[in-house]
Amino acid sequence: MFRTKDHHLHLPHFTFDDSNDLRLLYGIRVIRDLVNKMAMFFLPIYLFTIGSKTEYLSSLPLDGFQKGILVISMYYVLVGIIGFFLGIPSGIIYRKIGYQKSFVFSFLLRAVFFITMYFSKENALFLLPSILLDTTNSQMFWAGYYSMLSKNALKKNMGKDMGVLQTLLQIVAVISPAISGVIAYAAGIEYLFFIGLVLMLCSSFLAVKMDTNVENNSVSYKEFFRWLHETRFIKLAASFSGKYIYDASIFLWPLYIFLLLGSVDKVGYLYTVSLFLAMLFTYFAGSYVDKHKSKKPFYYIGGALSLVTIMRSQIISVWGVAFIDMFDKLASKVYNIYFDTMFMKRSKGHDVVSFFIYREMLLNLSTVIFWACVGLFFIFFSGWKSIYILASVGVLAGLLMKDSKYDR
């Protein structure tokens, strides 16, 4: 993990444990986050545009806006369903071939995914292979990534490590929305996928240099459903699901701003400003989490973030968007550091791979539920307000996270 010196008053000096794999793992994560902030940032707008114009939905008694939302929700409902059933097979693959080969396979699949997404601009049917590629590459990456992180992270410095990681990711991503906004405005959103393609090939190169051991953990549907009958795991599942619902609602936020402002470059500029302010705050928040064991700030900030999330659907001006975005970025970064620190501590143990495989399966179930609700909300109810009320409840559910499996 990255290490920092407490007495440094200038920008933190980052160092690593004596682990080449961890250096590579962090490089992979930073590149992946850069891809998400550039090539994937405008994905909801891209899917919305395709859905509102495609002839394949012309027979439905819906307007263009509803068709756009329907395509977004259908895309992620299918991602969740496929992802859930790929959970156990991906765990078996981890056991047979190890993290390194799984990562390489994941990155190559995601590179092909960007190619199919590019062609979906001309033919919406290309979204179907995109869904399969998007789902499979995620299943082959995240459980392995978190398993390696959990096994190598020092528990006493977990908060600082999570804070430093968040800071590094924000340093890389702070100007990405503005840059991607300009590219999308000048050339088209589909050209951002070429950036994603190149970056995923770079990630593959880093993964090839890794030298990780094959895990001995075994996973099964029987064990997964047995865990679901345990009270402690039910609370854990609720916290993961709540956190996902909040994150997914924020994923839709660029679409809301786009519909409000009418331009993708303006969306990018607003995000860059808020990310820069949050970056300055995140590193110090991680150190605070380690030094102060009380969880009260987590609950206070979670409550405030829940209220701010509800307010999102009431914003109708540029300055309102900027204010809400700035406050949300500051509060959510502290909330995320507490949440990530506790769930990484919770994952420590001999069954770490099973823990993260089953976590991915839970998140895929949450994906299906949330995005099905999104489709229904916009067809039958007041969409934005309903989404952010649900997200507000999700933030509160995330407060159920505990850092020990023995905490009730």
Image: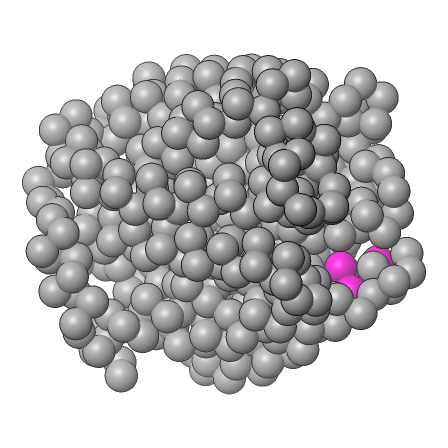
Q: How many marks?
A: 0
Name the image quarter holding the C terminus: bottom left
Q: Residue at x 30, y 46 (%)?
A: 84
Give whichever of 225, 160 is nearer the camera: 225
**Residue 221 percent across, percent down from the top left:** 14, 52
Question: Please, is residue 128 above or below residue 220 in the view?
Answer: above
Tell me, yes or no, if residue 348 can be seen here.
yes
Give whichever of 408, 226 is nearer the camera: 226
Tell me, yes or no, if residue 118 can be seen here.
no
Q: Residue at x 32, y 50 (%)?
A: 360
- Membership of 323 in magenta stretch: yes
Question: Please, is residue 407 above or below residue 216 in the view?
Answer: below
407 relative position to 51: left or right: left
Name the image quarter holding the N terminus: top left
Give whichever of 332, 367 is nearer the camera: 367
**Residue 380 percent across, percent down from the top left:** 63, 63
**Residue 351 percent across, percent down from the top left:** 15, 54
Q: How is the image coloured?
A: one colour
Q: Residue at x 66, y 66 (%)?
A: 381
**Which of the 4 quarters of the picture holds residue 144?**
top left
- Membership of 135 in magenta stretch: no
Give whichever of 109, 86 is nearer the camera: 86
**Residue 100 percent across, percent down from the top left:** 27, 25
Magenta-drawn segment: 322-326
Q: Residue at x 33, y 17 (%)?
A: 208
